Image (tube, helix red, strand yellow):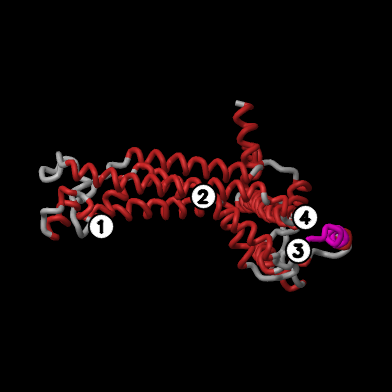
Amino acid sequence: MDRFRMIFQYFQSNSESVMNGICGLLALASIKIYTCFDFSCPCLHRYNMAYGLGILFVPPVAFFLCGLILNRQSLVMLDEWRRPQGCRRKDPAVIRYMCSSIMQRAMVAPAVWIVVALLDGKCLICAFSSSVDPEKFPGFTNATAEQAQELLAKVPCKEDELVGSSTSRRAVSRYLRCWSQALGWSILLMLIIAAFLARWLRPCFNQAALLQTRHWSNYIDIEQKIFEETCCEHSRLFAHKCILHFFESMREEIRQHSFDLPKEEEEDLLRGITHQDQVNKLLKTWYYEKPPLDVSQATQRHHLGRERPPPWTGSPHVQSKFPQHTNV
């Protein structure tokens, strides 16, 4: 049990490992779905191409969208791109790095589907069987143009009575499967070469800039996680305090059911944010005016904040309108 807990904590703290795992699972799912899929070409001249190309390209689009949806960094990247400037400037290089990383992971499963489908050859045979030149195959030379198109459209159907046992049908099928597999291996080779060049040519570029963009992209992700965890913790304490105020007459009974917190510790964890308007103002300030990336300034403001009330406490009018209850 401890081993599974350690593995879970590792993946929870390492966002890249989680995204790589999801990427691998989507790739395996694409292969499994294709092998289990019952491919049935309509064997009609008007519908073969639509069906074959649809099976070849529509599922990859779905896998691509799933990769974007399951990737947490896509939302983080969009938030960073759309947020107001505020006190922290936006670095386009960091946004481009995050977008590139997201796209690379989202494209793995679609690429696997397309390569597997091309190596299998069924989609291309169904889509382009009617486009083959009948003059190249002796079994279709004596037929009229309309009859040749009808016979070529039935090439993917082995059980059809007209072309089921025809050697010309097998010749057309082998011809298209050859082109399909050649295209699939070519795409696979190009992907491998692109990955190889991206890996081995990376040291030729500015490593300092790469380290900076990678560091700050990880920082944005971690900062968002910590902010959400802090908000959840504050919400739990805030809800606990509201419940205690509402059930003031049942205070002792509620404290006996593991809701008990020392008053000093609870007040300290709430950090003076004890009203709904204060929480809304804090969240709005976080979105519109994120703090600058300068810890020294934050430390100085923290020391000065001990001598004056926090900015979210508002004016004396607001304090009189929302009195703070200290006795629970």
Q: Which of marks 4 and 3 is nearer the N terminus?
A: 4
Cα distance between the residues tagged 2 and 1: 27 Å
Q: Which residue occupies 64% across, 65% down?
A: 280
| Number of callouts | 4
* Residue picked out by circle 2: 190
**Residue 58 % position (x, y):** 37, 54
* Residue picked out by circle 4: 208
| Disc sitting over residue 291 in the figure | 3
Q: Which residue occupies 29% across, 52% down?
A: 52
Element assignment for label 1: helix
* Residue picked out by circle 1: 131
Label 1: few (<14), some (14–19) or many (≥20) C-alpha neighbours in 10 Å: few
Cα distance between the residues tagged 4 and 1: 53 Å
Question: The residue under label 1 is which amino acid type?
Answer: Ser
Residue contact between numbered discs 4 and 3, judged by CB atoms under 8 Å: no
Which quadrant holds residue 276?
Answer: bottom right
Front one among 206 and 251? 206
Q: Choose mark 4 or mark 3, whichever is in front.
A: 4
Residue contact between numbered discs 4 and 2, judged by CB atoms under 8 Å: no
Cα distance between the residues tagged 2 and 3: 44 Å
Front one among 155 and 53? 155
Cα distance between the residues tagged 4 and 3: 25 Å
Cα distance between the residues tagged 4 and 2: 29 Å
Question: The residue under label 2 is which amino acid type?
Answer: Met
Up the image or down, 20 lies above or below 64; here it is above
Q: Choose mark 2 or mark 3, whichever is in front.
A: 2
